Structure formats: structure tokens, C-alpha cells
């Protein structure tokens, strides 16, 4: 999420998001999304807002906790949809397994004493 919470980081970062004519999927909103939209237009890249993608996987539990992870998951599901539309075969079970098993050691871990 380019510069969503730190606007000073936003300028220039969207330039690294895409090659020409390659779709860009973003979970950003507000000023960050405007910056990404401008860069996508410059690169002739289709911008896909994660908020427009549907979740067709059914029931699953995210391994990474936090409300922001739900938005990150929408970006993942959009990417999977795009890859499938390009001919990649990605089973729903594989996506669910990944969402439920992903680990980020030392960050966003829950510890109990």
C-alpha cells in the first residue's frame, strides 16, 4: 500500500508498480490510489481495485490476523483471478491452503505466556 499511512513515502513509489501494459492490482484508496491510477495510465496498464474483486472461495480462516489482512487478501484474490484469466490453473484449495498457512515470523505473530 504505497504511502497510505505515510504520504511522504508516496511520491515516486508508484513508478515501480508496473511495466507497460501489465495489469496493476491495488488495495489502496484515497491519495495513494490516485497516485497509482496516474502511474497506471502512464504505463498503459489496467488498474484493478481490489475492492471490486469477489471472494468465491467459500469458508476459510486467514493465518495472518488483523483487519488490514482482509484487504490484503482481496489483493491476493484479484491476482489469482487475473492469473486464471491468463490461463494459469490455480485450484481454489491451493489458494485456501496458502491463506490459512502463510507465516510472517517475528511480525504479526501472537504469543502467549
Image (cartoon, grey):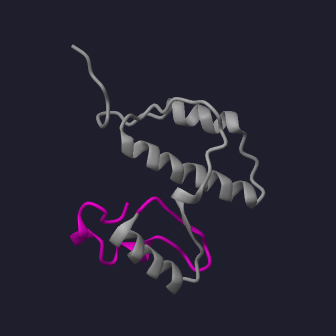
Residue shown at the point (33%, 78%) measured from the top left: 12
Rendering quarter of residue 46: bottom right
Q: Is 27 included in the stretch rendered in magenta?
A: yes
Q: Is 63 included in the stretch rendered in magenta?
A: no
The spot of residue 91 in percent (x, y) is: 72, 39
Rendering quarter of residue 6: bottom left
* Quarter of the figure that contains the C terminus: top left
Residue shown at the point (52%, 53%) measured from the top left: 75
Horizontal side of 29 relative to 84 (left or right) equals left
Horizontal side of 104 relative to 90 (left or right) equals left
Horizontal side of 78 relative to 72 (left or right) equals right
* Quarter of the figure that contains the N terminus: bottom left
Q: Is residue 96 above or below residue 88?
A: above
Residue farthest to the top, as pictured? 113
Horizontal side of 31 relative to 17 (left or right) equals left
The spot of residue 80 in percent (x, y) is: 64, 51
Q: Is residue 17 above or below residue 80?
A: below
The spot of residue 40 in percent (x, y) is: 51, 78
Per the rendered image, the range of residues in magenta is 1-28
Q: How many marks?
A: 0
The spot of residue 57 in percent (x, y) is: 65, 38
Residue shown at the point (30%, 65%) measured from the top left: 3
Residue shown at the point (32%, 30%) measured from the top left: 109
Provide the major secondary structure of the magenta segment.
loop
Amino acid at each position: 500500500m504505497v504511502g497510505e499511512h505515510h504520504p511522504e513515502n508516496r511520491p515516486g513509489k508508484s513508478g515501480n508498480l508496473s511495466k507497460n501494459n501489465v495489469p496493476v492490482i491495488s488495495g489502496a484508496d484515497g491519495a495513494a490510489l490516485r497516485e497509482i491510477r496516474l502511474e497506471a495510465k502512464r504505463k498503459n496498464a489496467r488498474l484493478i481495485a481490489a475492492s471490486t474483486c469477489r471472494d468465491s472461495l467459500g469458508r476459510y480462516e486467514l493465518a495472518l490476523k488483523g483487519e488490514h489482512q482482509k484487504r490484503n487478501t482481496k489483493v491476493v484474490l484479484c491476482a489469482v483471478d487475473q492469473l486464471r484469466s491468463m490461463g494459469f490453473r490455480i485450484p481454489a484449495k491451493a489458494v485456501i491452503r496458502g491463506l490459512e498457512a502463510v507465516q510472517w515470523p517475528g511480525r504479526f505473530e501472537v504469543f502467549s505466556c
